[in-house]
Image (cartoon, rainbow, N blue to C red):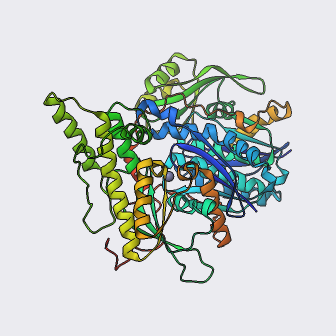
């Protein structure tokens, strides 16, 4: 059973094909990074134009790499939200064309949930409950995948917390731009930070001990910029590697602390980490250390399954199909699609 | 022959099925920003009414703009994918050409204009020729004043427009017009204009189509809208 998944929610045009829910047959990403690099961030109109140009060839390449034809595909999955409206609409319209043309079921996928369910492509069936940290240029969210209360239903998805301002990847981009580094900022800062001292600057850890699972990054960003200006004004030489390492450490500290604490608070021993920022070497190492100390299990898929990709959408779509949750051909893209299908836990610390 | 035509480059979205004798079934919706929800069910409806299935289609015609960017892309992505799924030949045509063609009986010269927002219009000029119209020069984007000057300089042309109704400058030059028609580019007209091209096999593969924007992309970074990726929390 082959499911084709289309992802166009932000700045990657991606198409993946997944067999029997767990096996990646192909996972093709046509990155738009070069188009957005001159602007230092994602430009929605540029992204939407590129999605339209890239969607057809990306579908073709994904089929070729999977060694199959559209006639062999049995369902079409697509990211329906959250994301950039104009970008999402291209993928959803394309998915409908394929579904209608081949008379196939259409599956409307939640992008955040797809990030988490991508883990099944590497580690097999996720056994809920599972805590998941999704960190990327677009999201910084802590969620829990809960056991279904009804037999045969999909696991429920509950939001524990989320950033109240910038996403982690966005903070990396902005600080990288300020330091004169390239775009995207995450990998640039990761690289530079390796030769820096993470304790050189004492940057704030916003919301670190506030008892919630929320994140805040704009204050940290401001603190970094203020510190640089202060040093410059004092005529001190600034070691950018130290700044990068200290800034990265502040972000990583809070992410690791909140994710591990959520698992401990809820008595859950498995944590999934996904999203583009999950490629950050410091975050991976620190998270692995912390989980080892608690005796828990950390699942971090390979980078190709962590960043935005089509296989994760196909996997999430295959799960929807298995649960009988097929979309109508009138499916809307929903830029503000809620992350969770369960309400926040009334007893939880975020209430 | 059974052609599917899809046109979504203005607030009106429309689809049509045509055979050699003309329109078989059409559907249109005049609600902006609903192109995405409307298209696929509308095609299903038209096929059902015509007693045909998607397997009977022999070609897909689609409007390639200029017009509303998002609507345009929804129509093109849908039409391209459908053609890809059925391995069908494609013809892409500008909405302005479709409008010029649909007003061919109104005057020897026709200006077609679509509201381009930000005080601008997309427009082009057409001359009647046997069996249709021929465009003078390129598709243009410019101010309403440019269009008004062109109308005033011409020999009682017709104006076919979409979305320009209330424009004062245009009202003042109405005396120069032979006719003023308010009609967006429609799928049925697109299908009629595209049909001879399918007969002559002047078609492309779906991936070869390009959208016509006539303007560079707005280079505004979406920091704000990127917050939406959080999942509705910001
Ligand atoms: Zn993502």
Q: Residue at x 75, y 49 (%)?
A: A66
Marks counted in the figure total 0
Please, which residue is most extreme toward the left here?
A234
Q: Residue at x 80, y 55 (%)?
A: A72
- The image quadrant where one finds the N terminus of chain A is bottom right
Q: Is residue A342 left or right of A101 when viewed as pictured?
A: left
Q: Is residue A321 left or right of B35 when viewed as pictured?
A: right
Determine which quarter of the picture holds residue A127: bottom right
Q: Is residue A242 above or below residue A135?
A: above
Please provide percent x and percent y for residue A304: 58, 48
Please provide percent x and percent y for residue A45: 49, 38
Please provide percent x and percent y for residue B203: 79, 33
- Front residue (pair B186, A98): A98
- Front residue (pair B49, A318): A318
Please, which residue is most extreme toward the top here?
B153
Q: Is residue B2 above or below residue A326?
A: above
> Is residue A333 in view?
no
- The image quadrant where one finds the C terminus of chain A is bottom left
Determine which quarter of the picture holds residue A315: bottom right
Q: Is residue A234 left or right of A3 when viewed as pictured?
A: left
Q: Residue at x 82, y 35 (%)?
A: B198
Please provide percent x and percent y for residue B199: 85, 34
Q: Is residue A184 above or below residue A306?
A: above
- Front residue (pair B203, B133): B203
Q: Is residue A71 above or below residue A213?
A: above
> Is residue B89 in view?
yes
């Amino acid at each position: 059973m082959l499911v084709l998944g289309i992802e166009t929610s932000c700045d990657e045009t991606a198409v993946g094909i997944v067999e029997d829910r767990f096996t990646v047959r192909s996972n093709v990403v046509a990155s738009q990074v070069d188009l957005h690099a001159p602007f230092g961030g994602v430009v929605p109109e540029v992204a939407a134009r590129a999605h339209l140009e890239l969607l057809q060839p990306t579908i073709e390449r994904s089929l070729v790499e999977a060694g199959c034809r559209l006639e062999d595909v049995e369902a079409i999955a697509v990211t329906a939200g959250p994301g950039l409206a104009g970008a999402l609409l291209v993928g959803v319209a394309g998915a409908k064309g394929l579904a209608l043309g081949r008379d196939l079921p259409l599956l409307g996928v939640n992008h955040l949930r797809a990030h988490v369910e991508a883990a099944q492509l590497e580690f097999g069936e996720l056994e809920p409950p599972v805590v998941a940290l999704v960190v990327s240029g677009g999201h910084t969210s802590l969620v829990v995948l809960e056991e279904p209360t009804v037999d045969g239903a999909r696991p429920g998805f509950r939001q524990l917390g989320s950033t109240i301002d910038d996403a982690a990847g966005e903070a990396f981009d902005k600080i990288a731009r300020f330091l004169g580094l390239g775009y995207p900022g995450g990998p640039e800062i990761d690289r530079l930070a390796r030769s820096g001292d993470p304790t050189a600057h004492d940057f704030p850890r916003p919301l670190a001990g506030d008892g919630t699972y929320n994140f805040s990054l704009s204050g940290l960003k401001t603190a970094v910029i203020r510190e640089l200006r202060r040093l410059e004004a004092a005529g001190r030489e600034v070691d950018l590697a130290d700044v990068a390492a200290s800034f990265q450490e502040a972000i990583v500290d809070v992410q690791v602390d909140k994710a591990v604490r959520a698992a401990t608070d809820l008595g859950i021993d498995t944590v999934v980490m996904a999203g583009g920022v999950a490629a950050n070497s410091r975050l991976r190492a620190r998270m692995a250390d912390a989980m080892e100390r608690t005796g828990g299990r950390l699942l971090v898929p390979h980078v190709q399954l962590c960043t935005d990709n089509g296989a994760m959408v196909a996997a999430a779509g295959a799960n929807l199909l298995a649960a009988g949750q097929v979309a109508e051909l009138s499916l809307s893209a929903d830029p503000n699609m809620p992350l969770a299908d369960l309400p926040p836990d009334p007893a939880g610390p975020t209430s | 022959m059974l052609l599917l035509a899809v046109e979504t480059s203005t607030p009106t979205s429309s689809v049509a099925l045509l055979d050699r004798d003309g329109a078989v079934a059409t559907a249109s919706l005049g609600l902006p920003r609903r192109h995405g929800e409307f298209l696929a069910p509308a095609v299903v409806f038209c096929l059902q009414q015509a007693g045909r299935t998607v397997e009977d289609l022999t070609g897909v015609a689609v409007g390639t703009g200029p017009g509303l960017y998002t609507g345009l892309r929804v129509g093109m992505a849908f039409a391209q994918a459908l053609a890809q799924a059925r391995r069908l030949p494609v013809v892409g045509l500008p909405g302005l050409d479709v409008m010029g063609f649909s007003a061919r009986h109104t005057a020897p010269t026709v200006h077609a204009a679509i509201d381009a927002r930000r005080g601008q219009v997309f427009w082009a000029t057409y001359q009647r020729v046997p069996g249709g119209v021929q465009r003078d020069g390129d598709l243009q984007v410019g101010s309403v004043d440019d269009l008004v000057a062109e109308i005033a300089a011409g020999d009682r042309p017709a104006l076919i427009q979409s979305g320009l109704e209330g424009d004062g400058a245009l009202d003042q030059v109405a005396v120069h017009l032979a006719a003023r028609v308010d009609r967006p580019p429609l799928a049925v007209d697109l299908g009629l204009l595209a049909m001879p091209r399918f007969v002559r096999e002047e078609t492309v593969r779906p991936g070869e189509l390009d959208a016509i924007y006539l303007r560079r992309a707005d280079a505004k970074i979406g920091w704000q809208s990127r917050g939406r990726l959080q999942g509705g929390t910001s």
